[in-house]
Image (tube, rainbow, N blue to C red):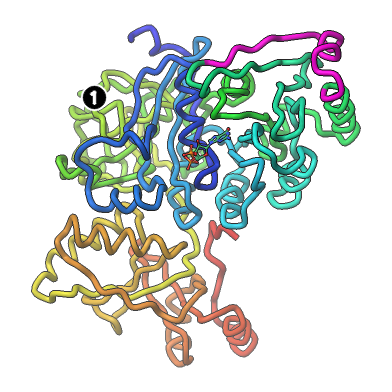
Amino acid sequence: MPTSDVLPRRTFAVISHPDAGKSTLTEALALHAQVIAEAGAVHGKAGRRGTVSDWMDMERKRGISISSAALQFTYRDHVVNLVDTPGHADFSEDTYRVLSAVDAAVMLVDAGRGLEQQTLKLFQVCAYRGIPVITVINKWDRPGLTALELMDEIEREIGLKPTPLTWPVGESGKFHGVLDRRDGGFIEYTRTSGGATRAPERHLSATDAAAVAGEAWSTAAEEADLLGLDEADHDQAQFLAGRTTPVLFASALLNFGVAQLLDVLVDIAPPPGPTPDVDGGARDPGDDFSAFVFKVQAGMDAAHRDRLAYARICSGVFERGMVVTHAATGRPFATKYAQAVFGRDRSSVETAHPGDIIGLVNATALRVGDTIHTGPAVHYPPIARFAPEHFATARAVDTGRYKQFRRGIEQLDQEGVVQVLRSDLRGDQAPVLAAVGPMQFEVVAARMESEFNAPIKLDRLPYSLAQQTVPESLDELAGLSGIETLERSDGTLLALFPDKWRLGSVQRLHPDLVLEPLPASAR
Ligand code: GDP
């Protein structure tokens, strides 16, 4: 599809709680747009095909998506890249990495449930990254909270000021359509059986709407006026700065509101912009080619025991076969096996542009955060790690399989599945695994067994808090009971504490110790 190559890009991710409707929405978006390339995980649960490795069985059983995939489609002469994220808060570090590769996020909220405690962390990750967030209130066809309650909750819990672009006509459960706050008109939706096809919509003036929708319309119009008084109107600069969130009401299942989401993505979501580098400069999309790796994944498919590095293109034009420089080593890197599609379906990519995501096959040298480029050297900043809150030692069940054990732990560390900490005291046989959420441990255990043939035994450690420290503090910390210091594989020194009270007392009694909260803590 050569003409699509020059179309403007919109690259975004959907963040949601499991079951909020992310898969349904993705399918609905694909229905409205023209799909260029599609990843296996999209049709997830029901339609997953063929050979998948064991840890994907775990994914399937739990109904969550652990692996990232992406979907590329065209809409209104734009190429839209939708990058998938894991739907569980335990994988918020993974979500954070994906968010480093997108220009906007869609926060999908189930109208019946509101912001669920477990998911708040994921949403806060969005706010933390400061990327523009569009909120979609889904399942409006079912009874749930009121629209105003939901707006309050978003502002209170996430700290983003909601600025609804549409407002529902009909309370949740009685979804007739939406009032379009941009022009005051009515977008009326009509149900189709099962929502299998695009739902027809009619655009009516306010006067006609009052005749068609009666009281539901007047209530919506009154509420929409109240929003105006509350300064809840869309402001592009505030949205781009990550301070406000435009809101849309939808039913992904009935295909209501899906076209409006696509329009909003095209109209107000930002195109790929300059990417800041570590030296305080930036590369513009029009400069020489550059990209950074935001995810490395192996064992995606039992039939392809290889390793894929996903890179987001920041500048220039990528052409398959071009030789690029791997910034970390200065070595050339051949891109003969670049792939357009991630997930289980694979096809090779010929060209790609800023905002697009490519999968590089068997890219064993590439690590998460690495830069590849042509032209003058450029280094993009590393992707920050989160403060872990769960810790466990890992040992090979069968000591005869230590080699496989070491290789597996190293691989999972490089993929960022879990953080790996070491100390002389513990030795290399039993490294400490550190996680943001405990489900990361399950993924490690499942993959160590199925991919590396090295089943592990995990023993939880009684810590819940990590602080960054410096070599000068190590001796003094070593003399304190209940605290342990280890080195993370990126060289960061971490001191582990049982809880914040122990940390507080240590800080009071030893004010000279250097103990800093970890950067990019999701709290
Ligand atoms: P995911 O876990 O976020 O990917 O959620 P799914 O897309 O799998 O949806 C979870 C459940 O909610 C499924 O049974 C969907 O049919 C249902 N669902 C999704 N969107 C809607 C909606 O707009 N209205 C209603 N009533 N159900 C929905």
User: Based on the displayed image, in which of its 4 quarters is residue 27 positioned?
Assistant: top left
Left or right, residue 195 beside residue 53 = right
Q: Which residues are magenta?
A: 198-216
Left or right, 44 with respect to 33, comes to left
Q: Position of residue 143 (x, y in %)?
A: 69, 39
Query: Can the viewer see residue 135?
Result: no
Q: Position of residue 182 (x, y in %)?
A: 77, 18
- Whole-percent x, y for residue 199 in the image: 57, 16
The residue identified by callout 1 is 347
Q: Which residue is at the front of the view, 261 or 93?
A: 261
Q: Place residue 434 in its image quadrant.
A: bottom left
Front residue of 148/518: it is 148
In which quadrant will I find the C terminus?
A: bottom right
Where is residue 321 drawn, in percent x and y?
Answer: 20, 23
**Looking at this rendering, what residue extends furthest in the front direction?**
193
Q: Is residue 448 left or right of residue 260?
A: left
Which residue corresponds to the image point at 71% horizontal and 22% vertical from the top-left?
176
Above or below, 375 relative to 54: above
Q: Is residue 516 magenta?
A: no
Amino acid marked by disc 1? Ser
